[in-house]
Amino acid sequence: MSSKIEEAQEHIRQAEKCLKTSILKWRPDYDNAAEEYNKAATCFRNAKSLDQCRDCLMKSADCHRQNRALFHAAKCLDQAILICKDMNNLGDIRKLAERACHLYQQHGSPESGATVLDKAAKILEQTHPEDALQLYKQAVDVVTIEDSTRQGAEYASKVARIMVKLGMYDQAADAIRREIGLHQQVGSDGAIGRLAVALVLVQLARGDYVAAEKAFKEWGNCCDSAEVQTLESLLLAYDDEDPELAQRALSSPFIRHMDVEYARLARDLPLPKGMSVAPKANVIENATASYISPNSADTSKPSTGPVAEDEDEGGLC
């Protein structure tokens, strides 16, 4: 390992020598300096000195940029992203990916720029989903500018699914509609049908039944028979406040086999509460005396007037 580090340090000295100027050398030799820094980075990587490897890659990228070799500068930053991943230093990855993408675009290679954004987003998706979301959004913009509609739809799908995962349902609905628009441009009706189901689920998660029904009416013609039956049952269940029917619809095989974010959304979707029935009043028997009408002609009851004295007791002879 020590020999590799000594070799790397020698390459760094050569790179610094290339960058020096003198009376006879007015301009630094950025090309050879970049090459020496890149060799030093390789030595540091082999020696497992990842911090120094990343620093040399950054210096090599800067030399390439100064020399207007933008594609090579972006490649160095691309390699630095992988080194950061190995170091578990994920906080710098988004910034490096954005810089690399910008250099690729300046060079005229937007596809490579979108690829580096996608690569970085995949690294960040589990631990830093917010950063991954921003990188996927930028990737959509980059490829759609270049009329790469299919690739844009793929990145838009990742944007929508991360938003659902983060509970950003309002933004997710807009992202799904954008994804549908991209699929419309290439005539992919099957994908639109699946997205119609996803949009209905997101609208129900927002608590907006009207928007869910509108989404089905707008895009339901692109759904196959299984999707149509599932959505009709689901919307009927929410319209009738029938939780059992809603649960059966949400448990359909089609929904369970959707992308994992939508399948989890369907699993956790609040069910309709059902029609509430007023509880039956409890009746307490013999709580009060029975009511007797004063107009009753019942002669079996004793008279309520004063009791007459018995004429036979103490009466006149």
Image (tube, grey):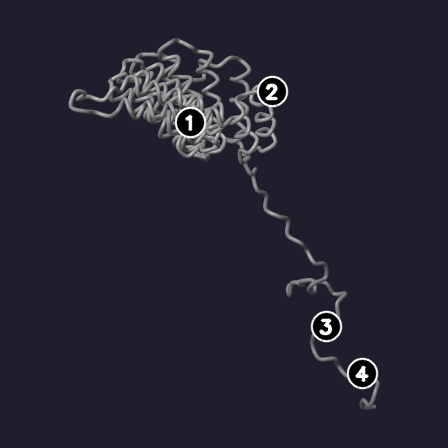
Q: Position of residue 19 (x, y in %)?
A: 26, 24
Evaluate whether residue 213 shows in this view: no
Q: Which mark is residue 310?
A: 4
Q: Position of residue 25 (x, y in %)?
A: 19, 20
Name which residue lies at 19% across and 24% down.
Answer: 22
Badge 4 amino acid: Asp
Residue, disc 1: 53
Q: Position of residue 166 (x, y in %)?
A: 46, 34
Cα separation, mark 3 vs mark 2, equals 79 Å
Q: Nearer the viewer, mark 3 or mark 1?
A: 1
Asked whether the beta carbons under mark 3 and mark 1 sit within 8 Å of each other, the answer is: no
Cα separation, mark 2 vs mark 1, equals 50 Å
Q: Nearer the viewer, mark 2 or mark 4?
A: 2
Cα separation, mark 4 vs mark 1, equals 128 Å
Q: Say few, some or many: other residues with alpha carbon within 10 Å of mark 4 (under 14 / 14 to 19 / 20 or more).
A: few
Cα separation, mark 3 vs mark 1, equals 115 Å
Which type of secondary structure does the marked residue at label 4 adopt? loop
Tell me which label, 3 or 1, sits earlier in the chain. 1
Name which residue lies at 15% across and 23% down.
Answer: 23
Quadrant assignment, res 14? top left
Q: Nearer the viewer, mark 3 or mark 2?
A: 2
Residue, disc 2: 253
Cα separation, mark 2 vs mark 4, equals 93 Å
Q: Residue at the far left: name it.
A: 23
Cα separation, mark 4 vs mark 3, equals 15 Å
Which type of secondary structure does the marked residue at label 1 adopt? helix
Q: Position of residue 183 (x, y in %)?
A: 39, 14
Tell me which label, 4 or 1, sits earlier in the chain. 1
Asked whether the beta carbons under mark 4 and mark 3 sit within 8 Å of each other, the answer is: no
